[in-house]
Amino acid sequence: MSGTDTLADLAGLLLSGKVKVVDLAAVLGPKTPLLKLPPELAVDTPPIEIHTISAYDKNGPFWAWNWLKVGEHSGTHFDAPHHWITGKDHPDGSTDTIPAQSFVAPANVIDCSAEAEADHDFLLTADMVKAWEAKHGEIQPGEWVLMRTDWYKRNGDEAAYLNADENGPHTPGPTADCIEYILSKGAIGWGTECVGTDAGLAGGMEPPFPAHNLMHKNNRYGLASLCYLEKLPPKGAILIAAPLKIEHGTGSPCRVLALVAD
């Protein structure tokens, strides 16, 4: 079968509804929860603003449009390697230089929802990933690994979504050996349903923030604040995660989609 035939088959499956397009992004707006960092460590992203330019009025009688104030790492977003100091020297590590081929890839979805509900500080380990592979099949080079926790269901309540107390935020994520393992398998990226790709208490790990530190060191990518991962099978979905082509961009809000066989 030729490549043209393959694309024609895919087009037919999309038109017939036998391949579904699943939206994995949260709504982006002024109420979108944003990461909060200790003031001694960093300046936080400003709140999202949406301003009207015109709305079929004297400023533009036949059209409506807005201008936005939004951080690169707001809402459902893509982390480029240049987001982290360990990835700052990759020549193709910003959103305008990453090869477009990297934005479409198969996805592995590891269901940790029951564990995360029982323990908000739940950590996915390399051994757990290996056990998942024994059941569902190996992670292949060039594929995404996504951690399903159902945490996105808290997205409408910023306090519940960030889940912080005097000891810091409490959200699930990966251990360092988990990230090291998926990198050894050749994973192209790591994604979560929490506000960031690391666990809430990842600042105290070795190395600190391993998902950021290690993935971006290896010129790989991150996705945060994903939604609806329960709609994806453990294997078999195709992920489409294309950031805006921002000059020297370290990341971008994006409409992450998945193609899933019905």
Image (spheres, rainbow, N blue to C red):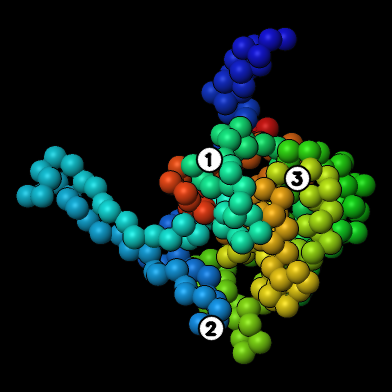
- Does dot 3 land on a helix, a strand or a loop? loop
Q: Earlier in the sequence, mark 1 or mark 2?
A: 2
In this orientation, does residue 255 appear? Answer: no
| Direction bottom: furthest residue | 166
Q: Which residue: 78% across, 57% down?
A: 179
Residue type at numbered disc 2:
Glu
Residue type at numbered disc 3:
Ala
> Is the N terminus in the top left, top right, bottom left or bottom right quadrant?
top right
Choose mark 3 or mark 2, whichever is in front: 2
Judging by the rendered image, the residue that carries numbered circle 1 is: 97
Q: Do callouts 1 and 2 mark residues in contact (Cβ within 8 Å)?
A: no
Judging by the rendered image, the residue that carries numbered circle 2 is: 40
Task: Give the Cα distance between marks 1 and 3.
Answer: 19 Å
Q: Which residue: 40% across, 70% down?
A: 46
x and y, in percent, of residue 23 in the image: 54, 45
Q: Find residue 168 and report its image quarter.
A: bottom right
Q: Earlier in the sequence, mark 1 or mark 3?
A: 1
Q: Find residue 169 and report its image quarter.
A: bottom right
Judging by the rendered image, the residue that carries numbered circle 3 is: 187
Task: Give the Cα distance between marks 3 and 2.
Answer: 33 Å
Residue type at numbered disc 1:
Thr
